Image: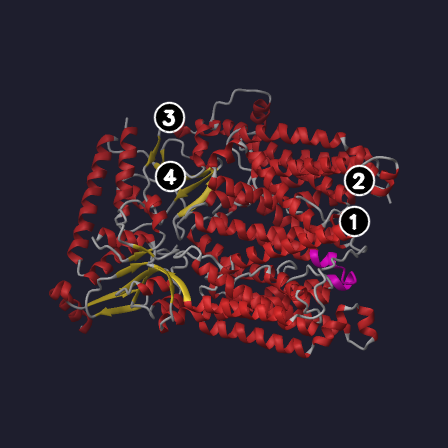
């Protein structure tokens, strides 16, 4: 009851007031909404940027700009080092109000708490829904920073735009969009295939598209297979997310040219979109897949 | 005993290779036999299943056969040229040299790596092999020394490659898979690229096989007949390196085939150079086909694919130990004389090291880069609370590994013995990686007991095997090499999954102080100090056992008990360090030598000087790791391996040059 009252109070007083947020360890309370935020992975960086917050620190910014690219990382953000070993001294020098991390060992969280209060979320796990977790994290960060309205609007817009995209695809494909598999090329002989519990497959679901090559849920929702495994996509389409690393040479091979989806011209590529990202990356995947599938319509 | 004709010796392996290839085709083709026969005789493929057979399955099988044959041939050639039964592309450093060159070229000059694959690869293989020859010396190639040098070079190159990949990309899965060696094909391009190159080299080798016959009774006899062997040996070594380079460039690193095939060939009765070469080639083909069949089968069952090279190592490492065990009666008596420094440490040297220690400590505590460039400042309480566990853990780990090395070098009487090269660190690492993979727990929390269990298992294996073979250093080295390869295989399977978890694992494998807690740092430092004091008290034992079992026993030393206790302490030190901060290589090898070099030659002096040097090296490496690429960080273990390995190689080369000069006088 008291907690409910606190939450209500926080909602009423808005940005100026106190906030309580649930993380993987329980309820964390903040007297004032934190201003200086450090995030320790790219998914969290996406989440805060999508909420219109510029973090003071985030990890591996050069690689972020290559691999994630959207939302754009402002130049003012300080690089706090590796995602696996964030630089504690640099984080401390940034004097943050809160450090947001996910899937971090308790010992690491305890150490970060010597610098500033920590929100530690559980984001990636084989036995939960990664997309639902991302949605919850987005709302938690919104509560923390007094941007609940904005987050709810973003979620509503996402759902609305995805249903528009879904309708557009249904329209183009006469009600039955092609079954589709989403991959990343690895090298001339192996690929990554997205399966259950991944953002690409969740985006396909939202678009009303069936998965052409279902894979059991894993922590990151992705498995590595030989290229020839793609031949199981006999009547569906395949979408490859760029960049291709060393894999584009596969396009030149006879095996690839004989793939059913290549011969039937049901293959497409998309611009870079980060498949281990924040909640809004669901929409970014949906947009990319919609644009990739539309030209394949009969 | 059945007399075996040369023909039969070669025929049986050939039949085996054909049978395994046929089994591979039958299991993986996925079309019925009649259709398969049609496709093989030129029928036009019309379904994808047909194309898969002609463009994926067949090139894969052929690739397995030719690369396997190439590696078997290269292994046999290396063994015959060096007269060393543990020689192979892997154990002489050539494979990892080729691999590192390909990794660097792929990242730095992709166009070059694509257009001149075999030459990039060959340059790397030659450089690494040259390094091993430079260290071991041409005569040393005959003995265990070359293999230990090769192992050291492998560790060093592996560290460098690991560091590069760690910093490169969130998603360099393809480098991992390729590093583990995979035969997967999606067309004939690669196979048709490799076939003529391997074939030409093989023909060249077969044409030269008469030269190998002259080597058999000993090089002296051949030279007495007026034949200068050196140009021929260089040519044969170059051909073996070329085979290695083409194999690595075509499919990545695949170890063990080149070591196992010639061993099996001799076990099967190959007596002449030519039959050994031919039988090794066929056996190599059979082994790689078999390993690939296992890899394909496992990939069908497991969620992610299993690289062929990992399957080859998983099967090859235990097989090698079993096979070689019986043939190790002839112990390797070659010893490596280390440089003779002064008889006791000079005051000025000690002062120099003291100064260096103070400098390293000052740098580690007070100097760091920041937002506005370098800062020299007294750290505030918070910053200090992050720094001191790392500094203390580095010092403790360096000291403990150095002491482990001192014990092993004296017990095994081999100056190249160290916990990393003998497999103790690998045992601990293997136990931790398996626990983490199986139990799904973070490797940082898998714990000290698991690691101790791993290194203790290696110790027990060493004791058991060594007892039967009168502590032959060869056996010890063999266990180390096999364990190292097993570990490598498992780690590569884990890494090939290429997700963020793999990168965490790779960071841990570098030996990082990042996650060491204050308590663990205190424990490590305490352990090092306790070990130092304990060994100081027992230094007479170490001195005695280092003089030889007979002498030591005559002086009343319970040799068996001392050896067991010594190995247990060495394994315990290495296992604890590995559990708390990951495998730390080279410190245990280099620090004892450096101590001897500056005059700490008695066991009593070597103990504390080596521990001191190890601690300084690690503190300095940790500081460099924290600051070199700020705000990113490199694991202290990787820096220490590069510094220590570089120093060690320079030391050995200098020693060889000095020996040559004095020999000429």
- Label 3: chain letter: A
Camera-near label (3 vs 4) is 4
Q: Which residue is mark 4?
A: A243
Q: Which residue is mark 1?
A: B664
Q: Label 1 to label 2, Cα distance in Å?
A: 40 Å
Q: Which residue is mark 3?
A: A264
The reply to whether discs 4 and 1 touch (Cβ–Cβ < 8 Å) is no
The image position of residue A272, as x and y in percent, is 33, 40
Q: Residue furthest bottom?
A: B537
Q: Label 1 to label 3, Cα distance in Å?
A: 75 Å
State the SS at label 2.
Answer: loop
State whether residue A169 appears in this view: yes
Q: Label 4 to label 1, Cα distance in Å?
A: 60 Å
Residue B288: mark: none
Q: Are marks 1 and 3 on the same chain?
A: no
Camera-near label (3 vs 2) is 2
- Label 4: chain letter: A
Residue B270: mark: 2
């Amino acid at each position: 009851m008291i907690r409910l009252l606190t939450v209500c109070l926080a909602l009423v007083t808005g940005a100026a007031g106190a906030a309580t947020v649930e993380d993987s360890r329980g309820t964390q309370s903040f007297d004032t909404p934190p201003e200086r935020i450090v995030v320790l992975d790219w998914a969290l960086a996406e989440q805060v940027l999508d909420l219109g917050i510029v973090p003071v620190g985030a990890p591996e910014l050069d690689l972020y700009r290559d691999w994630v690219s959207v939302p754009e990382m402002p130049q003012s953000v300080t690089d706090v080092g590796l995602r696996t070993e964030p630089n504690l001294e640099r984080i401390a020098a940034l004097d943050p109000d809160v450090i947001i991390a996910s899937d971090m060992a308790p010992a690491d969280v305890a150490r970060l708490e010597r610098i500033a209060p920590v929100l530690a979320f559980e984001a990636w796990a084989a036995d939960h829904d990664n997309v639902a977790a991302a949605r919850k994290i987005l709302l938690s960060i919104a509560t923390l920073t007094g941007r609940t309205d904005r987050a709810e609007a973003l979620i509503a817009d996402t759902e609305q735009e995805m249903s528009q995209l879904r309708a557009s695809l249904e329209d183009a494909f006469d009600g039955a969009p092609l079954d589709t598999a989403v991959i990343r090329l690895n090298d001339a002989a192996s690929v990554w295939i997205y399966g259950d519990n991944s953002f690409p497959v969740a985006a396909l679901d939202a678009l009303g598209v069936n998965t052409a090559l279902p894979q059991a849920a894993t922590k990151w929702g992705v498995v590595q297979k030989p290229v020839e495994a793609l031949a199981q996509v006999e009547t569906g389409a395949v979408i490859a997310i760029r960049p291709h690393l060393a894999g584009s040479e596969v396009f030149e091979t006879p095996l690839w040219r004989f793939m059913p989806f290549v011969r039937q011209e049901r293959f497409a590529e998309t611009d870079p979109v980060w498949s281990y990202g924040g909640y809004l990356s669901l929409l970014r995947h949906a947009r990319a897949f919609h644009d990739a599938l539309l030209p394949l319509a009969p | 005993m059945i007399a075996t004709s040369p023909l039969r010796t070669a025929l049986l392996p050939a039949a085996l290779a054909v049978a395994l290839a046929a089994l591979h085709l039958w299991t993986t083709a996925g079309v019925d036999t009649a259709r398969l026969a049609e496709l093989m005789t030129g029928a036009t493929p019309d379904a994808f299943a047909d194309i898969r057979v002609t463009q994926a399955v067949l090139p894969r099988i052929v690739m397995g056969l030719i690369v396997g044959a190439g590696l078997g041939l290269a292994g046999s050639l290396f063994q015959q040229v060096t007269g060393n039964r543990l020689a192979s592309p892997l154990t002489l450093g050539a494979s990892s040299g080729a691999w590192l060159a390909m990794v660097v070229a792929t990242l730095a000059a992709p166009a070059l790596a694509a257009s001149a694959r075999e030459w990039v690869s060959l340059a790397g293989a030659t450089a690494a092999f040259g390094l091993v020859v430079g260290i071991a010396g041409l005569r040393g190639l005959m003995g265990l020394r070359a293999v230990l040098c090769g192992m050291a070079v492998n560790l060093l190159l592996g560290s460098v490659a690991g560091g590069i990949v760690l910093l490169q990309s969130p998603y360099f899965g393809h480098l991992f898979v390729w590093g583990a060696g995979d035969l997967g094909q999606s067309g004939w391009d690669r196979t048709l690229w490799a076939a003529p190159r391997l074939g030409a080299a093989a023909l060249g080798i077969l044409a030269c096989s008469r030269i190998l016959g002259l080597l058999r009774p000993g090089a002296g006899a051949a030279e007495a007949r007026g034949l200068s062997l050196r140009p021929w040996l260089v040519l044969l070594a170059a051909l073996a390196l070329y085979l290695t380079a083409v194999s690595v460039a075509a499919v990545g690193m695949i170890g063990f085939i080149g070591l196992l095939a010639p061993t099996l060939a001799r076990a099967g009765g190959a007596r002449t150079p030519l039959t050994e070469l031919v039988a090794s080639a066929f056996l190599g083909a059979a082994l790689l086909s078999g390993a690939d069949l296992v890899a394909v089968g496992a990939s069908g069952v497991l969620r992610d694919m299993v690289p062929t090279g990992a399957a080859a190592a998983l099967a090859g490492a235990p097989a090698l130990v079993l096979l070689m065990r019986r043939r190790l009666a002839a112990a390797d008596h070659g010893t490596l004389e280390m440089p003779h420094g002064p008889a006791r440490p000079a005051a000025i040297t000690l002062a120099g090291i003291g100064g260096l220690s103070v400098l390293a400590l000052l740098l580690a505590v007070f100097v760091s880069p920041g937002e506005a460039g370098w800062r020299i400042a007294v750290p505030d309480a918070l910053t200090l609370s992050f720094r001191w566990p790392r500094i203390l853990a580095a010092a403790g780990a360096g000291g403990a590994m150095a002491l482990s090395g001192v014990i092993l070098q004296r017990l095994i009487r081999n100056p190249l013995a160290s916990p990393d090269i003998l497999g103790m660190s690998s045992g601990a690492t293997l136990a931790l990686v398996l626990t983490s993979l199986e139990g799904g727990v973070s490797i940082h929390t898998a714990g000290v007991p698991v690691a101790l269990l791993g290194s203790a298992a290696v110790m027990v294996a060493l004791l058991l095997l060594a007892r039967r073979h009168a502590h032959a250093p060869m056996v010890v080295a063999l266990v180390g090499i096999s364990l190292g390869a097993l570990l490598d295989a498992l780690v590569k399977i884990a890494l090939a999954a290429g997700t963020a978890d793999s990168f965490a694992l790779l960071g841990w494998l570098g030996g990082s102080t990042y996650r060491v807690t204050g308590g663990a740092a205190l424990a490590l430092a305490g352990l090092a100090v306790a070990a130092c004091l304990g060994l100081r008290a027992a230094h007479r034992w170490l001195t005695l056992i280092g003089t030889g079992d007979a002498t030591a026993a005559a002086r009343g030393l319970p040799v068996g008990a001392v050896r067991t206790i010594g190995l247990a302490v060495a394994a315990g030190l290495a296992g604890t360090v590995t559990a708390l901060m990951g495998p730390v290589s080279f410190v245990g090898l280099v620090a004892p030598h450096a101590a001897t070099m500056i005059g700490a030659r008695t066991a009593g002096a070597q103990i504390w000087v080596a521990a001191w040097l190890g601690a300084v090296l690690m503190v300095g490496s940790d500081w460099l790791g924290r600051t070199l690429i700020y705000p990113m960080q490199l694991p202290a273990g990787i820096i220490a391996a590069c510094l220590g390995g570089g120093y060690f190689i320079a030391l050995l080369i200098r020693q060889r040059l000095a020996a040559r000069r004095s020999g000429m006088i």
